Image: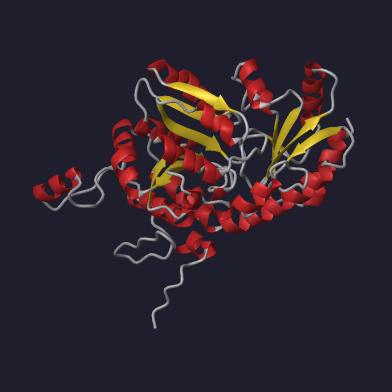
């Protein structure tokens, strides 16, 4: 009797996408080559035209990169995936695959600062307008959509306020308006959330974060239906060249092997730390999807398989100037946490979004996103939660 039961994510993270060469190696091979040799002129022509599948040139086809794409696609429940040089390259590739001059984008206001700059400043120079929507209210998203809207984009949870967008509503708005829906799934990863299961068109990853998990390399990915990936996204990647290097893909393959274990452990640690922070003097508010105080806790339970491992909190202060001074003083007094804007690492990181990840935004844009001077973001790693609490307690005392 044939076993047709689908593999669990833990198994897919270790086994999916593995390709072995003639040497039948156990670990995935690293193919450091710029090009590939063809058996004949006819074979070369067939591969270049796409009539035959195979590897042509590592800018858009490489065996190690393809293994990473196939493994991540299996985890996300996607028909296909394409890897990129970074998460921002993945966002750009998805946008260029869909948009042209005169088109309109509706984007969540609480996205990563560089994403706002990409849509507003870079794509804006080419006649593409963007409207930003704060929160998850369907009426607000619907009101922002125009006849020119071709792309709906969001992070859920958002960076750094942990605001959620209802994925089923988001996907429905896209279908009704004829716009392509794109979701950045960086904070949850496919271990905790699979947007494609809710009807979303494309999923974006900054593989630099949790997919790697140890802060080693840059990478990104775009995932979705095979026809859209191959016919819309691949031409952008092939011609523009924001490609993932084979070495980075090999490192990311190793990262995926432990992704389910890390996400569950780091989410549990973040839950404990967030609950503790809510009880601390000087902390005005904690933003974390796992808290009973989170305003969207019902949606969290329905949409996510866990809270994730990123939290943020606001410091009590009488003015923005005082808030920044107190936030910086706290950050400067941590001894265990790493002061860096990256996240998804096994080592806990801490940053001040208003002056780092969202520092290039205008004050108006930061206010629209709800990012104040007293906000601090923590991405919880794998250290002892007791040690992390002690580190923060000492810093809060300053």
User: Could you say which is closer to the camera, residue 328 or residue 205?
Assistant: 205
Relative horizontal placement of residue 287, taking residue 346 as reference (left or right): right
Quadrant for residue 71, please give it. bottom left
Asked if 224 appears above or below 370 in the picture, the reply is below
Q: Position of residue 363 (x, y in %)?
A: 65, 16
User: Could you say which is closer to the camera, residue 297 or residue 313?
Assistant: 297
Q: Position of residue 182 (x, y in %)?
A: 46, 39
User: Could you say which is closer to the camera, residue 34 or residue 366?
Assistant: 366
Asked if 254 appears above or below 7 in the picture, the reply is above
**Which quarter of the rendering shows the N terminus?**
bottom left
Relative horizontal placement of residue 312, taking residue 15 as reference (left or right): right
Instruction: Look at 45% across and 25% down and name the residue there.
Output: 146
Q: Position of residue 284 (x, y in %)?
A: 83, 32
Q: Farthest residue in the bottom direction?
A: 1
Relative horizontal placement of residue 230, taking residue 45 as reference (left or right): right
Instruction: Look at 82% across and 39% down and name the residue there.
Output: 392
Quadrant for residue 281, please give it. top right
Q: Position of residue 135 (x, y in %)?
A: 63, 33
């Amino acid at each position: 009797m044939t076993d047709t039961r689908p593999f669990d994510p833990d198994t897919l993270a270790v086994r999916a996408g593995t390709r072995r060469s003639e040497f039948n190696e156990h670990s995935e091979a690293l193919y450091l080559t710029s090009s590939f040799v063809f058996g004949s002129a006819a074979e070369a022509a067939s591969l270049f035209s796409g009539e035959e599948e195979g590897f042509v040139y590592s800018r858009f086809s490489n065996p190690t990169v393809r293994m990473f794409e196939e493994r991540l696609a299996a985890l996300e429940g996607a028909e296909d995936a394409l890897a990129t040089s970074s998460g921002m390259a993945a966002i750009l590739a998805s946008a260029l695959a869909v948009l042209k001059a005169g088109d309109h984008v509706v984007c969540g206001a609480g996205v990563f600062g560089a994403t706002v700059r990409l849509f507003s400043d870079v794509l804006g120079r080419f006649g593409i307008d963007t409207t930003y929507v704060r929160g998850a209210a369907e009426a607000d998203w619907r009101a922002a959509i125009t006849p020119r809207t071709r792309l709906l984009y969001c992070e859920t949870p958002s960076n750094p306020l942990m605001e959620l967008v209802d994925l089923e509503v988001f996907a429905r708005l896209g279908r009704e308006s004829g716009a392509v829906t794109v979701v950045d799934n960086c904070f949850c990863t496919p271990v905790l959330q699979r947007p494609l299961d809710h009807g979303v068109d494309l999923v974006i990853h900054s593989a630099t974060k949790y997919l790697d998990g140890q802060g080693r390399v840059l990478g990104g990915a775009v995932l979705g239906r095979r026809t859209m990936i191959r016919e819309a996204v691949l031409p952008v990647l092939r011609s523009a060249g924001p490609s993932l290097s084979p070495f980075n893909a090999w490192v990311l393959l190793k990262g995926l092997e432990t992704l389910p274990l890390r996400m569950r452990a780091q989410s549990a640690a973040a839950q404990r730390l967030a609950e503790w922070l809510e009880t601390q003097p000087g902390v005005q508010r904690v933003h974390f999807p796992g808290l009973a105080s989170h305003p969207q806790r019902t949606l969290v339970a329905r949409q996510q398989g866990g809270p994730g491992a990123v939290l943020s909190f606001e410091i009590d202060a009488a003015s923005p100037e005082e808030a920044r001074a107190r936030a910086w003083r706290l950050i400067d007094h941590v001894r265990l946490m790493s002061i860096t804007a990256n996240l998804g690492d096994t080592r806990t990181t801490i940053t001040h979004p208003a002056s780092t990840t969202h520092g290039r935004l205008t004050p108006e844009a930061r206010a629209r996103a709800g990012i104040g001077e007293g906000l601090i973001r923590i991405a919880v790693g794998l250290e002892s939660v007791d040690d992390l609490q002690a580190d923060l307690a000492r810093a809060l005392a300053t």
